[in-house]
Image (cartoon, rainbow, N blue to C red):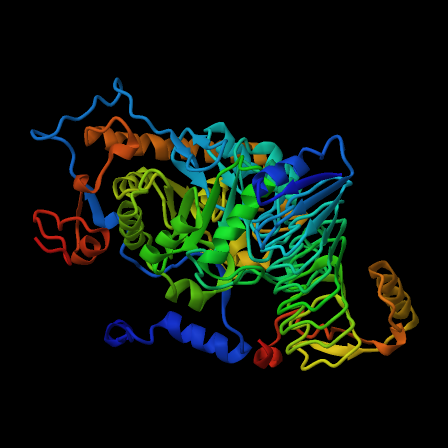
Amino acid sequence: MKTFDLAVSTVREFNQALHDEKNIVTEKEWAATNPKGMHNIAVGLDADIAVDIHGHAGYFCAGMNKTAAVTIHGNAGQGVAENMMSGVVRVKGDASQAAGATAHGGLLVIEGNAGARCGISMKGVDIVVKGSIGHMSCFMGQSGSLVVCGDAGEALGDSLYEVHIYVKGTVKSLGADCIEKEMREEHIAELTGLLEKAGFDEDPSAFKRYGSARQLYTFKVDNASAY
Amino acid sequence: MSNEKNISLKESATFDRSTMAEIRRAAETGIYDIRGFGAKRKLPHFDDLLFLGASMSRYPLEGYRETCNTSVVLGDRFAKKPITIETPVTIAGMSFGALSANAKEALGRGASIVGTSTTTGDGGMTPEERGQSSKLVYQYLPSRYGMNPDDLRKADAIEVVLGQGAKPGGGGMLLGQKITDRVAQMRNLPKGIDQRSACRHPDWTGPDDLAIKIQEIREITDWQVPIYIKIGATRTYYDVKLAVKAGADVIVVDGMQGGTAATQDVFIEHVGIPTMAAIPQAVQALQEMGMHRKVQLIVSGGIRNGADVAKCMALGADAVAIGTAALVALGCNDPKWDDEYKAIGSAAGYYDDYQDGKDPAGISTQDPELSKRLDPVAAGRRLANYLRVLTLEAQTLARACGKNDLRNLEPEDLVALTVESAAMARVPLAGTTWVPGQKY
């Protein structure tokens, strides 16, 4: 394992070392200590490596991740795993707002709670949150799945496209064009798989499913009040 | 008798026929008018400015013998690989989706022939566009449609888009008729829906966050390429200062004459400020921060000819960008398609229904048959010719003012024809020393 002490090295040096693993992986396991809320740690990775960040990370940690497995042993700031393409990002603590924003693929696991706009405009990622999520989560979510073992805040799934949302607890309110939907067998199977991948021992049958009513997919005069 | 009656008819200036037609249209449909193109109302513009050519007090340069540099380096503030463009006229961001693949290819070809850059748009980077563009600016938009780190690293520069002149503060839209299989796949959306693009970035708010976002993009690209920030012209003085503070290498200011593929007419005509009014604000902000020429300024919105280019440079821009004019050079609104424009309720020279995807010229469409009408090689050549004319015209004016570099043009070379243009451009009214709003 190669370890960078971010009290001594810069984020730039750490990121460059991780980027240099793209073509030939020289070390599978990497770690950073003393992140102390620094921004943009482990962004733009594109290698089959594991990165452990021991402490709290600032904005955009693991942004645009491809392939790599990044674990934050602490809390994550705004936009963790934003625009992730593949791989796994795990936050052992809480995540701030816009977790997994616009992410296209991979798996984002948040073992604590997530703030507002979790999964905003998500485009194929799977997000599994052990705790609760804040308001306006999954706003304009396009595809992928959002699993919430706790509660969801106001306006969940506003202007939703095709994301599958599963919530175990209460939903304070649903956003425009987001409705509760029937939980069929294929959804139980999908949810079971996501919970297993996240490592959470939850009963899939205790969840409710939410999705798009698809009434705002085209501009209609009668929907004017929804915009 | 009938002639006398016609002469006595008086059209209301407030409720003219166009206004009444829009009222009837709104009453019939219940939805606002969505269209393409840019502002069509008459605005204070560069035609209201004139150059003071050399005479006794200034030496002109010989037009056919003495050089006048047109190349510009963009993005040397932080990037390891700044861009050098051979002409200060770049191609503005326009998306595949709004435009056909052939049109995007033609833009790349034309720009590459003359050594300038072209720009992607909402919806991501296509292989055709990357392949044909020697210098490609990749837009980083709120929607993040098609955004991925591989394309980010293929770009020669990255433009973080906060807004555009046609709709500052507004998001984008692409109506269902243009969401084909390929467009839907690139944007990760269901086919045929009316696509909405967010007006705000999803993972940051405000200039302090933007500074961190720019640092993230620099980290992902290993600080190789320049980062632009594009803003629609509104509170330009303050926005430019904040963009510099956020870490931009290049700032793009798009005035309200800038075009769009699909926006509400009320937005196009009633939000933003004219390009001419925005440039002095931007330059003042840069000068006060000691960053003029260090952070390069690109301006766009209504640039049509070499005089417009030269006037923008004289007011302090480092380069300009063209969108609508580039499409016209490709063949948009060409009279040869007049019958077909009329068949869809428009006419050559008036066509602005880019959102419908029925463009007879094969440019603002995803219809495969219409798209075939645009030969990307021939259209690219037309664009290159046009870009060369813009450059030659700008050089002609610069030499007449005694300048051996387009960027040596200065506000002192200009006067204004109207009081309002003098106030906006901050140059004297012709024949006077009066700059409205400035004390002596």
Where residue B239 sits: x, y (%)?
37, 56
Q: Nearer the viewer, residue B170 or B112?
A: B170
- Residue B275 located left or right of residue B325: left
> Residue at 64% of width from left, 73% of height from top?
A134
Image quadrant in which the N terminus of chain B is located: bottom left
Q: Is residue B379 left or right of residue B254?
A: right
Inspect this view and state whether residue B361 appears: no
Q: Nearer the viewer, residue A213 or A184?
A: A184
Which picture quadrant has residue B89? Answer: top left
Q: Is residue B330 visible?
A: yes
- The residue drawn where x is 12% and y is 48% is B430
> Is B17 left, or right, of B141 in this rendering?
left
Rendered image quadrant of residue B178: bottom right
Q: How many marks?
A: 0
Image spot of residue B322 (x, y percent): 42, 44
Going by the image, does B352 lie left or right of B219?
left
Kindly indicate the quadrant of the structure image that contains residue A213.
bottom right
Asked if A222 appears above or below A105 in the picture, the reply is: below
* Direction top: furthest residue: B65
Residue A227 location, x and y as percent?
57, 75
Check the image and report above or below for B219 versus B167: above
B15 in relation to B75, above or below: below
